[in-house]
Image (cartoon, helix red, strand yellow):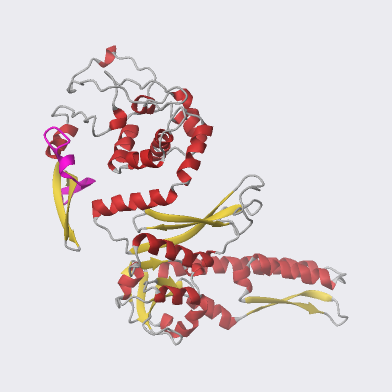
């Protein structure tokens, strides 16, 4: 393994990164592969390891002594000899770290594994790395300022460290951390918080404390990301999800019944609007009432992001269910760029284009795009028509399956009606009406009416196919139309956005 230095410039500012690489053998000969990206290295960090970062590959191979972290680098890790523990603080005072003792540099050594005995195994590496990243992000200093020490026996900033590292180590819930997650790690030695002091009530109260400083946290973390990687947050993704409550939730005015993404319409919920980067970095979130429609959250989110990061000409990506004509006008007034989907009804203007074989550009296997014009388009807007062969084949198979099932259901009704007597025409109509309701896509191209005999009695359903509707459904499968106010004219690039 070896380190590779990579530099880039963003807006005239140079950034230096380090990649940990290794050489591997392939069928085409030796190749170099990136194992991990170490991000931007500050001068202080480069000097933090004995021998510098250049010794890291040798360290991983066990060829150099293990470097010891400076106590100034991780103030919460100061401990006595060995891996000592901070004594729990009494009521009215905050747990204070013990005085640091000199730790001799560790050396690699060979051990007789037959003479070793394992007792109370705990995970150390993930917890230590989580605390190290927390310190590098300067979350420890921020939370110490936001959550100053009070009369609590364990400081809220320390409990926040437990929550952060537990989430970093993929713990799913606060009760899971309290019951077994905390005890299975070395956090009690690293943080000096006794296992008996970590319970679900304390963790939940810490979440309440952190929730009061949401804006400060959402401003601090993206700023650290910006400083390390030189990004401008000009590309934003916005979507809305929901989370439901168990119980009446009478004390929360935002808890309302609405469209549930969890299929839990039986309970109250709140909606959460999230803005993140294409890399998945969350930038901001807002909590809305549970009965708030997605389309009504766009302007609030855009204003919040403008207040936090300035009114830059950002590219905002949202699904078509969140965009209306008024929102498009609102985004254009703020000089924001947008690639959004259009309603299916707009595809009717391009029915002939979808059947053409030439003029399309393949952006990935089985997916083609081409620029088009639209009669209802706004000045300065570009339209991109897209079609996916693989998706079309799948959707047509789904429609064919629905049509076969609907035809089978209507056929069973016909067999029943052939058995006399059938006089309850209202019951027959209800039964025929229920079948298309179960298969709405097929009901658009198959129609059923009740056939009567000479005596006026129902004798069976008459099934007819709507040929124009079937042809339209066949053409529009896996086809969609995008609209954007970007100046870019390359349809492949617009589709990737």
Q: Is residue 318 magenta?
A: no
In this image, 37 relative to 357: left or right?
Answer: left
**Residue drawn at (15%, 39%), measured in percent from left and top?**
53
Q: Quadrant of the C terminus?
A: bottom left
**In this orientation, which residue lies closer to the viewer: 264 or 145?**
145
> Can you see residue 362?
no
Residue 428 in the image, given as x and y percentages of width and height:
80, 70
Dividing the picture into quadrants, the one containing residue 449 is bottom right
**Residue drawn at (43%, 65%), measured in percent from left and top?**
303
Residue 220 in the image, given as x and y percentages of width and height:
34, 50
Q: Residue furthest bottom?
A: 375
Residue 312 in the image, given as x and y percentages of width and height:
33, 68
Q: Quadrant of the N terminus?
A: top left
Vertical arrangement, residue 329 with respect to residue 78, above or below: below
Total numbered circles: 0
**In this orientation, which residue lies closer to the viewer: 297 or 252?**
252
> Can you see residue 124?
yes
Dividing the picture into quadrants, the one containing residue 399 is bottom right
Vertical arrangement, residue 82 with respect to residue 405, above or below: above
Q: Is residue 47 magenta?
A: yes
**In this orientation, which residue lies closer to the viewer: 21 or 5?**
5
**Residue drawn at (49%, 30%), measured in percent from left and top?**
178
In this image, 465 relative to 328: left or right?
Answer: right
Vertical arrangement, residue 132 with respect to residue 185, above or below: below
Which stretch is magenta? Answer: 27-52
**In this orientation, which residue lies closer to the viewer: 105 or 94?**
94
Vertical arrangement, residue 317 with respect to residue 87, above or below: below
Residue 93 in the image, given as x and y percentages of width and height:
42, 26
In this image, 134 relative to 268: left or right?
Answer: left
């Amino acid at each position: 393994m070896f380190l590779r230095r990579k530099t880039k410039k963003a807006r005239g500012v140079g950034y230096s990164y380090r990649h940990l690489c290794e050489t591997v053998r392939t069928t085409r000969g030796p190749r170099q592969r990136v194992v991990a990206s170490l991000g931007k290295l500050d001068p202080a960090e480069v000097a933090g390891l004995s021998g510098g970062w250049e010794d890291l590959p040798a360290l991983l191979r066990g060829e150099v002594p293990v470097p010891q972290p400076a106590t100034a680098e991780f103030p919460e890790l100061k401990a006595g000899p060995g891996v000592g523990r901070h004594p729990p603080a009494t009521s009215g005072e905050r747990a204070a770290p013990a005085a640091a003792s000199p730790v001799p540099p560790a050396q690699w050594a060979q051990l007789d594994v037959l003479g070793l005995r394992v007792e109370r195994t705990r995970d150390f590496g993930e917890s230590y790395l989580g605390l190290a990243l927390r310190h590098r992000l300067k979350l420890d200093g921020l939370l110490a300022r936001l959550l100053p020490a009070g009369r609590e026996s364990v400081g809220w900033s320390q409990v926040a460290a437990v929550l952060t590292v537990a989430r970093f180590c993929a713990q799913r819930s606060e009760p899971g951390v309290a019951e077994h997650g905390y005890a299975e790690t070395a956090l009690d030695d690293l943080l000096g918080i006794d296992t008996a002091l970590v319970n679900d009530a304390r963790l939940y109260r810490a979440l309440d404390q952190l929730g009061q400083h949401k804006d400060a946290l959402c401003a601090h973390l993206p700023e650290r990301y910006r400083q390390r990687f030189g990004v401008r947050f000009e590309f934003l993704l916005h979507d809305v999800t929901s989370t439901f409550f168990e119980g009446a939730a009478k004390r929360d005015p935002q808890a309302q019944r609405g469209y549930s993404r969890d299929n839990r319409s039986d309970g109250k919920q709140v909606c959460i609007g999230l803005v993140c980067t294409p890399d998945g970095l969350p930038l901001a979130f807002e909590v809305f009432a549970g009965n708030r429609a997605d389309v009504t959250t766009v302007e609030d989110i855009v204003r919040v992001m403008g207040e936090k990061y300035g009114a830059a000409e950002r590219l905002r990506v949202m699904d078509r269910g969140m965009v209306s004509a008024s929102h498009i006008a609102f985004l254009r007034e703020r000089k924001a760029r947008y690639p959004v989907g259009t309603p299916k009804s707009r595809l009717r203007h391009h029915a002939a284009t979808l059947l053409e074989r030439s003029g399309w550009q393949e952006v990935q296997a089985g997916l083609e795009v081409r620029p088009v014009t639209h009669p209802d388009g706004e000045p300065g807007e570009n339209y991109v028509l897209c079609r996916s062969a693989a998706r079309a084949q799948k959707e047509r198979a789904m429609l064919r399956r629905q049509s076969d099932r609907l035809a089978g259901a209507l056929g069973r009704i016909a067999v029943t009606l052939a058995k006399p007597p059938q006089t309850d025409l209202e019951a027959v109509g209800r039964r025929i009406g229920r079948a298309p309701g179960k298969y709405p896509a097929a009901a658009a191209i198959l129609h059923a009416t009740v056939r009567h005999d000479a005596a006026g009695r129902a004798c069976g359903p008459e099934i007819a196919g709507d040929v124009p509707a079937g042809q339209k459904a066949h053409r529009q499968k896996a086809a969609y139309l995008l609209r954007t106010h970007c100046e870019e004219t390359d349809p492949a690039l617009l589709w990737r956005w």
